[in-house]
Amino acid sequence: MVMALVQAGFSLPSPAGVQPEDHLTAYLTGPDGRAALARFAPWAVGQDGRILYPPNEVHACLAWGVNKLLGKRVVDFSTDVDVDEILHHLASGAGVVLSGSFPVRGGELNHVVSLSGYKACRRDARFGDLDCLYIDDPYGNYHTGYKDHQGNDVSILPRDFMQIIKQPKARRKWAHIVGGRV
């Protein structure tokens, strides 16, 4: 999320000596984040009050937490954003955070990445025109099973994008739009 914020021209405030990502996680897993979890995702809290999914892993809470820490609405989350709309937001300077199931040895790693760019022959490209997309992945390069921890501008082919990014095989994806509206 922090990579997409920076891409869209925002910076997440954090205490001195604390990484913005760590500050966001601490905020989301603290009392305010747990209350937001019960409000936005009651399915993630058991009847006994036990947390079934941590707030930092629930998209509605993630968007809420960023907006709360920034003191204004900067992030919109939707489970229904067309891939061409995602490209339009990116080309307009918005940050885009996507969720996916990335292949690793013996299974999959579910996490979020920031869409950092794409390669196409036309400036006003639609998804079908793309040669390649690029993601910033905090875990590294999924092509190497994350043995390579350099995750900036990792290429992802359009067919892999459609398979990996939620919802798999669908044109409508889960997306956080940073600095734009869905």
Image (cartoon, grey):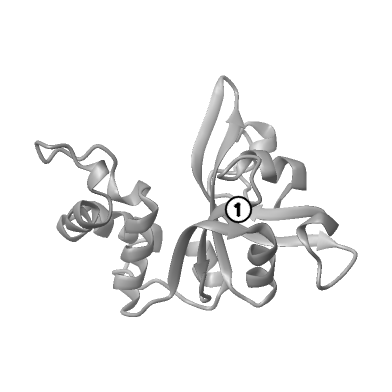
Furthest residue toward top: 106
Circle 1 residues within 10 Å: few <14, some 14–19, many ≥20? many
Q: Give the quadrant of residue 167.
A: top right
Depicted 17 relative to depicted 136: above or below? below
Left or right: residue 94 versus residue 70 is right
Identify the residue at image location x=30%, y=71%: 69
Tag 1, which secondary structure?
Answer: strand
- The picture places residue 117, in percent across and down from the top left corner, at 71, 62
Left or right: residue 35 versus residue 56 is left
- The reply to whether residue 42 is in sight is yes
Amino acid at circle 1: Arg
Furthest residue toward left: 48
Depicted 39 relative to depicted 163: above or below? below
- The picture places residue 15, in percent across and down from the top left corner, at 29, 69
Identify the residue at image location x=68%, y=45%: 161
> Where does label 1 land, which residue?
172
Total marks shown come to 1
Identify the residue at image location x=39%, y=53%: 59
Identify the residue at image location x=62%, y=49%: 151
Left or right: residue 168 versus residue 76 is right
- The picture places residue 159, in percent across and down from the top left corner, at 76, 42
19 or 77, nearer to the observer = 77
Left or right: residue 12 versus residue 28 is right
- The reply to whether residue 1 is in sight is no
Depicted 25 relative to depicted 102: above or below? below
- The picture places residue 138, in percent across and down from the top left corner, at 53, 49
132 or 46, nearer to the observer = 46
